[in-house]
Image (cartoon, grey):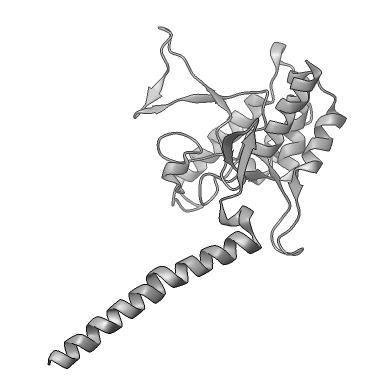
Amino acid sequence: MKRDIITAAIGILVFTLLLGIVYPLFITGVGQVTFPGNANGQKIYADGKLVGSKLIGQNFGTPVLEKNGKVKEVKGAVVTEADPRYFQTRPSATEGGADNAAASTFSNKGPNSVKTKEADEENIKAYLELNMGPNKKEYDPGLTAANIPVDAVNTSASGVDPEISEANAHIQAYRVAAVRGLSRATVDRLVSKYTSGRGLGFSGEPGVNVLELNLALDRLEGKAS
């Protein structure tokens, strides 16, 4: 009995050291040496300050104000509206506000759900409204509900997708270029610069990183001012 207890205790100690300390430290070391960017979360810095991650989408919106000047909130979450100066991520259904990385989740509603249909209709409406500039002039005059990219209508599984499709980005480029006073060619070049290819050359679709693209726009505008 005593021998069995000692053997079991030694086994627990050995495997705790091996699998709880040695193995994690080894894997961490391998990750830091071979692909430190991925291992550390693909952090993005601007002027030496951490501003986000290449892997996590952000909300590029401004708070909606009530008539009394106070920030509007719904269920404790600040209500925002898209800032036309920036490219917008795909719709987000995270709790606590759009693109809330602390509550990454998806709606879990089926494609035939009435609520899914209502949400899609709201997203289509919002996308078309964002394409409408001052004096009811459309930034992209050819944009209709029929040619809105699917990633501008559906939420992603995580709710914090950092990328949008090339089609989505090129449509938004009309608005961003007009609002910032830039040429379409300049904005399209930035879109191409921050477009990643397919995974391993064949998996998935190319994607445009919204955070990197918006930071590049701010840098460009800063140099011009």
Residue 144 visible (yes or no): no
Instruction: Name the outermost residue toward the top.
Output: 68
In this view, the residue in front, 118 or 215, is 215
Q: Is residue 179 above or below residue 94?
A: above
Write down the quadrant of residue 87 in the picture.
Answer: top right
Tally of marks = 0
In this view, the residue in front, 113 or 4, is 4
Residue at 74% across, 58% down: 198
Q: Is residue 35 above or below residue 140?
A: below
Quadrant in which the C terminus is drawn: top right
In this view, the residue in front, 59 or 6, is 6
Residue at 57% across, 41% down: 57
Residue 38, position in %: x, y?
Answer: 61, 55
Residue 156, position in %: x, y?
Answer: 55, 48
Residue at 46% across, 72% down: 23
Write down the quadrant of residue 88 in the picture.
Answer: top right
Write down the quadrant of residue 78 in the picture.
Answer: top left
Instruction: Name the outermost residue toward the right.
Output: 185
Residue 130, position in %: x, y?
Answer: 65, 25
Residue 73, position in %: x, y?
Answer: 39, 23
Quadrant in which the N terminus is drawn: bottom left
Q: Is residue 37 above or below residue 180?
A: below
Residue at 51% across, 50% down: 158
